[in-house]
Image (cartoon, rainbow, N blue to C red):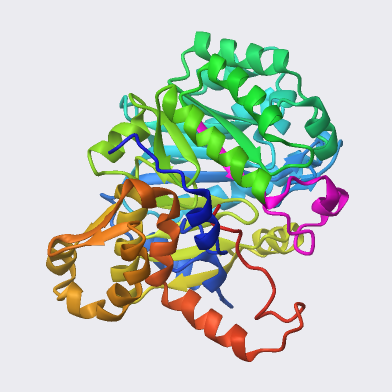
């Protein structure tokens, strides 16, 4: 993979339309309501036991509200609220584990939220012991056990404990180091705190450490974000996620506390990203794609170089061959070619567990066309190309004929030198890597159908057809 990225502000602005991040295809907005948990029971009991597992546990609690956040969370200072939730979680774990045939190996696990370290050390030990009593965890060097961490929510021995429990990768939410920005989003964490947890994680042997940053927050400027980036680079994380802040206060209530006049202008925001990309690539970070950077020797970079990188609801992953099983409120599972989601409503989730059912409320069932398009989109996102012969062989189609309309629609991107199309396939250029989502959107039949519907709907922004559903590409 090339380390070069072509930065053209005018071109990027022209293509900067709203669209999915494609952590799945079909995307999460295509979930359909299910009336029974039988479909999930069947999927779990009938899955191939030779396929390894990836487990996701959603811990929704946060002690503080970050105003930019759009995650499914419960903000509370009352630590006792986590205990009844953990009992529900263990019941769900028990039910799903009982349905699995054979002795599948867990190769990947991720705890997200919310703030997983909201839990006490004793609760995390108990939860991990419970998981190990129900599943076979791989001890291979390639096993990937990660946890999201709010540096403010670490007790003196928490990192050491997590390492002893088997976690080998972690992600620290930083977002910005500028004090004025932190105050505006209600996330105060000084540089000294971040440095301390980074040093400790290194000493404990976490093999990969990620830092999350967000651009487009209130009071950010090119200068302030450059200062944050210089400090973060000096800390030398293995991975960096640099996310675009999408201001959607009509969807996310905490964002209503952010003053729109404090946000950087679209031009300033674009310049912040451009400077960030230039700086990170100049100091040796590899652009994996979709806001993600990694050192060249990191597993993500190596997987991309070996063309085995995947993408799912957790973002880019090195374990795309696993069935993903989600636990907890709002968690998502991917079993075989189907996607399922637990209720995002804690009361509905609790009621389902109490009534001896699985808390699944939504489902995506894929057909052959979905699978073909999913492969195209994922190949473009993960490997910057899609090879016709590979698609033809796997699905027994003539992909150039199958996608004749889509290939024609890519002509503007060809003319702008964002991609090339030849007898071999579609190839994203250095100039087009930042805009690969635009190419993916051409193959998204659901997105294009929704766009057509929105044109015929009322101009009232409160109507579903016109309500913002996705963030801008940049």
Res. 31 visible in picture: no
Q: Tell me: 231 left or right of 250.
A: left
For the record, the magenta segment spans 240-266
Q: Is residue 424 above or below residue 412?
A: above
Residue 291 point in image, percent of width and height? 50, 43
Residue 249 point in image, percent of width and height? 79, 59
Residue 270 point in image, percent of width and height? 60, 46
Which of the two residues, 189 or 414, is positioned nearer the viewer here? Answer: 414
How many numbered circles are shown? 0
Q: Tell me: 404 left or right of 78.
A: left
Quadrant in the rendering for residue 442 = bottom left
Q: Residue at x 26, y 54 (%)?
A: 385
Residue 131 point in image, percent of width and height? 51, 37
Quadrant in the rendering for residue 307 = top left
Q: Is residue 286 above or below residue 89?
A: above
Q: Tell me: 290 left or right of 458.
A: left
Q: Residue at x 42, y 77 (%)?
A: 445
Which of the two residues, 104 or 304, is positioned nearer the viewer here? Answer: 304
Look at the image and say whether residue 436 sits in the magenta stretch.
no
Q: Tell me: 175 left or right of 290.
A: right
Find the residue positioned furthest to the top.
203
Which of the two residues, 467 or 340, is positioned nearer the viewer here? Answer: 467
- Quadrant in which the N terminus is drawn: top left
Q: Residue at x 44, y 59 (%)?
A: 437
Res. 125 visible in picture: yes
Q: Residue at x 29, y 48 (%)?
A: 383
């Amino acid at each position: 993979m090339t380390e070069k990225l072509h930065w053209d502000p005018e071109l990027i602005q022209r293509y900067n339309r709203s669209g999915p991040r494609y952590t799945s295809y079909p995307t999460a907005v295509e979930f359909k309501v299910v009336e029974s948990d039988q479909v999930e029971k069947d999927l779990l009991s009938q899955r191939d036991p030779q396929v390894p597992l990836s487990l996701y546990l959603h811990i929704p609690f946060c002690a503080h509200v970050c105003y930019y956040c759009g995650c499914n969370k419960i903000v509370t200072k009352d630590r006792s609220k986590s205990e009844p939730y953990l009992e529900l979680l263990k019941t769900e774990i028990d039910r799903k584990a009982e349905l699995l045939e054979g002795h599948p190996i867990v190769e990947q696990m991720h705890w997200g939220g919310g703030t997983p370290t909201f839990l006490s050390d004793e609760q995390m030990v108990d939860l991990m012991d419970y998981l190990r009593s129900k599943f076979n965890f791989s001890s291979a060097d390639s096993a990937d056990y990660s946890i999201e961490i709010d540096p403010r929510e670490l007790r003196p021995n928490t990192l050491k404990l997590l390492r002893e429990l088997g976690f080998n990768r972690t992600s620290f939410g930083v977002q910005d180091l500028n004090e004025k920005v932190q105050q505006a989003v209600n996330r105060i964490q000084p540089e000294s705190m971040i440095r301390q947890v980074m040093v400790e994680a290194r000493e404990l042997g976490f093999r990969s450490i990620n830092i999350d940053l967000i651009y487009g927050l209130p009071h950010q400027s090119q200068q302030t974000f450059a200062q944050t980036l210089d400090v973060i680079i000096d800390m030398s994380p293995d991975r960096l996620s640099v996310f675009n802040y999408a201001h959607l206060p009509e969807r996310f209530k905490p964002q209503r506390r952010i003053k729109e006049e404090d946000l950087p202008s679209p031009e300033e925001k674009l310049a912040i990203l451009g400077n960030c990309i230039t700086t990170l690539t100049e100091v040796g970070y590899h652009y994996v794609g979709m806001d993600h950077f990694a050192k060249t020797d990191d597993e993500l970079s190596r997987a991309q170089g070996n063309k085995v990188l995947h993408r799912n609801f957790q973002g880019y992953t090195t374990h795309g061959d696993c069935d993903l099983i989600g636990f907890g409120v709002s968690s998502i599972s991917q079993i075989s070619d189907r996607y399922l989601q637990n209720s995002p409503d804690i009361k509905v989730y609790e009621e389902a567990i109490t009534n001896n059912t699985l808390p699944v409320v939504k489902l995506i069932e894929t057909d052959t066309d979905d699978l073909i398009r999913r492969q195209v989109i994922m190949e473009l996102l993960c490997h910057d190309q899609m090879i016709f012969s590979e698609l033809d062989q796997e699905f027994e189609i003539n992909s150039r004929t199958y996608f004749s309309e889509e290939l024609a629609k890519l002509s503007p991107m060809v003319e702008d030198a964002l991609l090339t199309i030849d007898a071999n396939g579609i190839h994203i250029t250095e100039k087009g890597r930042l805009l690969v989502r635009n190419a993916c959107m051409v193959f998204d039949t659901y997105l294009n159908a929704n766009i057509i519907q929105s044109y015929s709907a009322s101009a009232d922004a409160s109507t579903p057809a016109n309500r913002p559903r996705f963030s801008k590409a940049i």
